[in-house]
Amino acid sequence: MSKVKRYEFFGNIGEYSIEIFVGDNINEIADEYGKVYKVEQSDIDRLKFNEASVIHLENKQIHQDKVVGLIPKNIKDSTVWHESLHLAWYYLDILGVDVDYENHEVLAYTQEHVAKNIFECIAKYKKATTKKRKTK
């Protein structure tokens, strides 16, 4: 059984959501992501070279978009902020919000919200996996 946990936030706004996979390391996370979304092995292997990754999945058959973050539990705070910018940008793009120098505040607020959620997901993951190890 995988130690990777999936968390979703923003709920589904229309057909759109953000999903975070958190695990001990990027290799386990990429493998779990590949199983869930039936991704080509070459794409999974490419993800394993990164400290963390963000993917925009578009399913035109069922009209559903999803933004997925692959986040190791020991990620640096600066990388969380980096990845949260990608997640926020994709999310706003999916919703049709154009971000430029005149309205970048919406991106800043969205990035802040995403980063807070990522930190919360990491904390939940660490708490859940720490409890399991103590009970073994």
Image: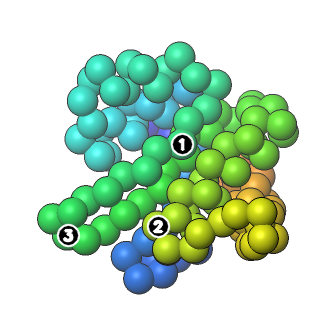
Q: Where on the picture, by quarter, is residue 134?
A: top right
Three-letter amino acid code of the residue under disc 1: Val
Q: Residues within 10 Å of mark 1 (few under 14, many from 20)?
A: some
List x then y, in percent, for residue 53.
Answer: 56, 36
How far apart are the two marked residues, 3 and 1, measured between alpha carbons? 21 Å
Q: Are marks 2 and 1 in contact (CB under 8 Å)?
A: no
Query: Which residue is at a point 31% across and 46% down the rendered structure image?
Result: 36
Could you say where residue 56 lies in the image, as x and y percent from the top left? 43, 50
Residue 81's place in the image compared with 78, above or below, is: below
Instruction: Give me the residue at 29% from left, 20% from top.
Output: 42
Q: Residue furthest bottom?
A: 14
Considering the numbered disc 2 on the image, is that residue within a helix, a strand or a loop?
A: helix
Q: Let me know if residue 129 appears in the view.
A: no
* Disc nearer the start of the sequence (3/1): 1
Q: Quadrant of residue 62?
A: bottom left
For marks 3 and 2, give the CA distance: 15 Å
Residue matched to label 1: 54
* 98 and 38: which is toward the camera: 98
The residue nearer to you, when weighing 66 against 75, is 66
Residue at the image position 25 percent from the left and 59 percent from the top: 59
Residue type at mark 2: give it. Ile
Q: Which secondary structure, mark 1?
A: strand
The residue furthest left is 61
Circle on res. 62: 3
Disc number lying in front (3 or 2): 2
Point out which mark residue 23 bears: none
Residue 76: x and y in percent read 81, 32
Tell me if label 3 and label 1 are in contact, CB under 8 Å: no
Please say if 18 is above or below 14.
above
Local crowd size for mark 3, using a 10 Å CA cut-off: few (<14), some (14–19), many (≥20): few
Q: Which residue is mark 2?
A: 94
Which quadrant is the C terminus positioned in?
top right
